[in-house]
Image: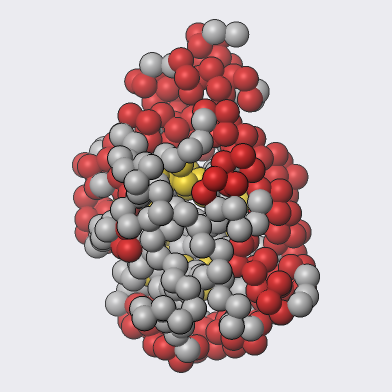
Amino acid sequence: MNANGISNKVLNQERLTPEDGLKLLQEADLLKIGSLANITRRRHHPEGYVTFVADTNPNYTNVCDTECLFCAFWRPAGASDAYTLTVDEVLTLMKTSYHNGATTVLLQGGHNPRIKLDYYIELVRRATKEIPELHLHAFSAPEISAIAKYSGISTKEVLQKLWDAGLRTIPGGGAEVLSNRVRKKISPLKIDADQWIRVTREAHMRGFKTTATMMFGHFEDDEDIIEHLERIRSLQDETSGFLAFIPWTFKPKNTFLERKLPNEIGGDRYLRVLALSRIYLDNITHIQGSWFTQGKKMGSISVHYGASDLGGTLYDENVLACAENKLRATIDELVHMIRSAGFKPAQRDTFYRIINHY
């Protein structure tokens, strides 16, 4: 089927096959794929709102034994700048962010063998008790797998204990590209694509809602992008557990891959993949635009290529800051990004429920 035939499928709300998705990614004119994504976005969000969240993203440790080649944040145990925050220190950061207006804390960290399960359980219990109005969105699938390994229990048991402590949503980090061919090149010590899907499925079956991410712009081919989207769409068909999908781009500065991949991908490729994500993931309501990696002007453009959300303010963030990506945004700036693109800004919570209009 040619690109025109695929366009007709999109207009008729027919599900794309992986072959359709690949052809659209490779052959469609950028403005055409953007138009199709915009039509698809309007089906999911006819009221014209684009949302954002006031959040913070502290990292409780940078010690990590997974040593991903794309990550500038991790440090080996014993490094001069290695750190692990106490539960009290993490809670202090969270409370400060809450008093500054955050409604969500996205909490992630390295895979540190010295941190045991009790640390995570105490953190969740105390956070939900001491700051009940601040939603804790914590511990990606690779972290849960690492906690299970270091604690000598199954990932299902870890998820159950986190649930009992009060955790309800999990970020979709650590997915990178869900192609084992690619993962062997950029993160050979991390859980593979099948394990990521398994842990996420377990989380959904337990009752957790999660997001899904894709970090692209390194060694992936177009076929790997399609494999990633197909894995996410298939799991969503099975569980309906994904709240949103967030594609973002690799930042090479200060990583082991910088010599091989010194240049970031351009806006054309980002918008093309973003638009395809909106079209292909017909069972996921929210697609997030990445002003954080692409810049604020591109944040405004992204809402015309399928994005219905612009993520958060990210009051504290260290992972991409280590890759010399230090963009931040205030609520006023996010409102301006959305309004200048011709949409209605709305603040949301972690479950994508609107809590304030602007």
Q: Position of residue 33 (x, y in %)?
A: 42, 22
Q: Nearer the viewer, residue 194 or 339?
A: 194
- Colouring rule applied to residues: secondary structure
Q: In the rendered image of this protein, does residue 249 appear above or below residue 92?
A: above
Q: In the rendered image of this protein, does residue 122 appear above or below residue 251?
A: below
Quarter of the image with the N terminus is top right
Quarter of the image with the C terminus is bottom left
Q: Number of marks in the image?
A: 0
Q: Position of residue 314 (x, y in %)?
A: 34, 64
Q: Quadrant of residue 19?
A: top right
Residue at left 60%, top 78%? Answer: 113
Relative placement, left or right, of 190 versus 42 is right
Q: Nearer the viewer, residue 144 or 299?
A: 144
Residue at left 65%, top 57%? Answer: 191
Residue at left 75%, top 64%? Answer: 206
Relative placement, left or right, of 257 versus 204 is left
Q: Position of residue 203 (x, y in %)?
A: 70, 61
Tell me if I can see residue 97 in this picture.
yes
Residue at left 31%, top 43%? Answer: 262
Tell me if I can see residue 103 in this picture.
no
Q: In the rendered image of this protein, does residue 128 appear above or below residue 223?
A: below
Q: Position of residue 133 (x, y in %)?
A: 47, 78
Relative placement, left or right, of 14 versus 318 is right
